[in-house]
Amino acid sequence: MIRSYLVVAWRNLLRNKIFSFINIIGLAIGMAVVFMIYQYIQAERSYDLLHTNASRLYRVPIQYDGALAAGPSATSHPSIGPAMKADFPEVEDFARLMRGSQFFPATTFTYEGDPNGPITFNEEAVFFADKPFLSMFSFPLLEGDTSALTDLKSVVLKKEIAKKYFGNKPAVGNTLLLNRMPVKVTAVVEVPENSHLQFNVLLSTSLLGPNWGYDEWAWPEFYNYVLLKPGASRDNLEAKLPAFMEKYSAKIWEQYKFKSHIWLQPITDIHLKSNYTLEQSANGSERTVYFLSMLGIFILVIAWINYINLSTAKALERSKEVGLRKVSGASRIQLITQFFFDAFLVNIFSIVLAAIITVIVTPYFESLIGRNFSQTLIASGTFYTPSFWVTVVLTLLVGIAVVGFYPALVLSSFNPAIVLKGKFIKSGKGTLLRKGMVVFQYVLSMFLVAGTVTMSTQMNFMQKQDLGYDKEHMLVVRASPIGDSTYGTRVNQFMNSVRQLPQVKQVAGSTEVPGHVIAERNNVRRVTQDEAGNVGTFFINTDENFFSTYGIKILAGRNLTEQDKFIYVPRDVDPNQPEIITDDGYLVSGASNRIMINEALAQSLGFKKPEDAIHEKVVFEQGRKFVGEITAVISNHNQL
């Protein structure tokens, strides 16, 4: 019987080639789009699920109120992790992650054991990490074990970084020079794309000193992670955190007129639900995932409705077949079964074609959005899980039921006597429902068009928005962080040599460049204000060519010159430097240094117009307090 149904369904497909082709192609394209969206959504939702302890791992962000009021930050104080483990029995362990740029202006690694000569690279994404990091998180270890960060001079390399220095040879046991300091490779790890933690190199926190940062409550630049014990309540622990912060920070709060609070953020929420400052890596958007989910459903529904409308439009041709079958004694159940087999065959061909389209188109889709989500899913084994295949089978069954149900009911309900007399064409049976489905299809199509236009506009804005600086044709060269008394002279000689090249238009020197996290961060306030007026900001040192090279506009005032070099000499070395006493009685040593600020900082300091800030003095901190005279206000730009 089943064979008979399949044979008849196959003959119907061949008899109506164009009709069948349109139905199969329409469904296949809809399914292919849904498959690609499904892959993307699954990849986004898979972030950090690779870690065995994912359900017990939390990040500890921080937010400030009062004088230092700002949005939540992904980083917090280095002492938070150690103190939480010491104070709370719920905390099994902690691990801190901190950027190497907090301690080194550049991180140069050299391998001297290669027979062809030394291999040297300036590495990005270098982090210090505590010993428990590799055991708390489940990054695949290709070489070494979870104790790799025990030794103070140990270094853990990402797989791709290890290959740069050692090729296909084992990396563990080899020695690299970190800014001339020997460090030993103790592990090689794979860092999957679906992890919010992205790094190239890990150094041991022990390198900074024993129990480094355990008493530091004023440097919020470190990623703190805690592992709760099995069964520990997140809510109960969070209820204790206000008293915990007051215990350790009350004096600092009183001194600087602010308060801070921390909370526990599940690591599985970070990629889609977190948009804090200083995120460790670029995050996704939960709203985008929801939007794409609805988009996929709409596309599939439109494809199904299109099939139903086309099938019912062919009802006249199939009506004679139904009439003859009924006259021959076929029951309604048998007719309905036959139409479901027709739908089954069309869906089978559609889903196979959709899989082929998906395989062909996915690389182009990944290139468009800049994500290799298919490789992420393959690496995580998503395609081999029962849930994936259950989803595929359910999609097929739902598709068969949806596209087969209405045509089967309509066609199987024909009166054979009327049909065989040729009077069916005058019947209005099902007209209202078919018109309703057409209207619904058009409404969904309008939503899809609106959504597509919106997303296209957003993508176009992101790709072409004015960043506030010129990023095209820029080459960044990082100087070695190790220097001697001739360091400045050699850097200047290099820059002068580069200027002579005909391909080079301009050269500028700075401690940081747009597009990178700025390591130096501290407070600024007007000289006439006390510390309650402090504004948190970032600092970079530049030369006079920086703003013209990057195309950053000066809104008011003048550029820095060679004579405006920063004065680092303290007063006890040069007693001729003037003293400036602020309103709160704080003695600031050193002559006024000329500085430039951006428009956002000018507004935060209370200047209504850029011109109002020129020649005004501010107190800022870089290790100790300095006085700065504002020479210019520059336009805002996107640093990251």
Image (tube, grey):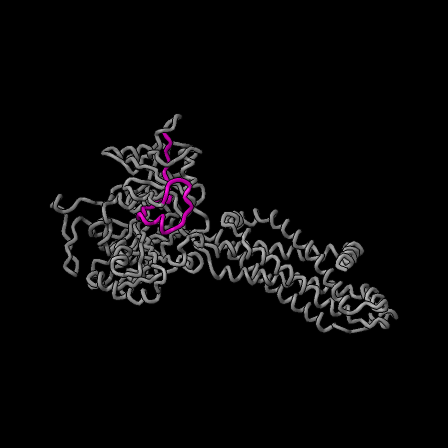
Q: Where is residue 429 in the image (x, y as percent from the top left)?
A: 77, 73
Q: Which residue is drawn at 68% across and 57% down?
A: 347
- Name of the residue lying farthest toward the top: 115
Q: Does the magenta stretch include residue 131?
A: yes
Nearer to me, 154 or 213:
154
Write down the quadrant of residue 69 in the picture: bottom left
- The magenta region covers 118-145
Q: Which residue is drawn at 28% across and 66% down?
A: 240
- Name of the residue lying farthest toward the right: 421
Q: Residue at x 62, y 58 (%)?
A: 393
Is residue 556 at all visible to an observer of this figure?
Answer: no
Image quadrant in which the N terminus is located:
bottom right
Q: Is residue 486 above or below residue 96?
A: above
Position of residue 563 in the picture relative to residue 71 (left or right): left
Q: Position of residue 112 (x, y in %)?
A: 34, 29
Write down the quadrant of residue 550 in the picture: top left
Q: Position of residue 359 (x, y in %)?
A: 60, 48
Q: Is residue 89 above or below residue 422?
A: above
Write down the quadrant of residue 606 in the picture: bottom left
Q: How many marks?
A: 0
Position of residue 626 in the picture relative to residue 551 (left or right): left
Is residue 74 at all visible to an observer of this figure?
Answer: yes
Nearer to me, 313 or 238:
238
Q: Which residue is drawn at 25% across and 45% down?
A: 208
Q: Is residue 276 magenta?
A: no
- Name of the residue lying farthest toward the front: 1
Q: Where is residue 520 in the image (x, y as percent from the top left)?
A: 29, 49
Nearer to me, 163 or 92:
92
Position of residue 322 in the picture relative to residue 43 (left or right): right
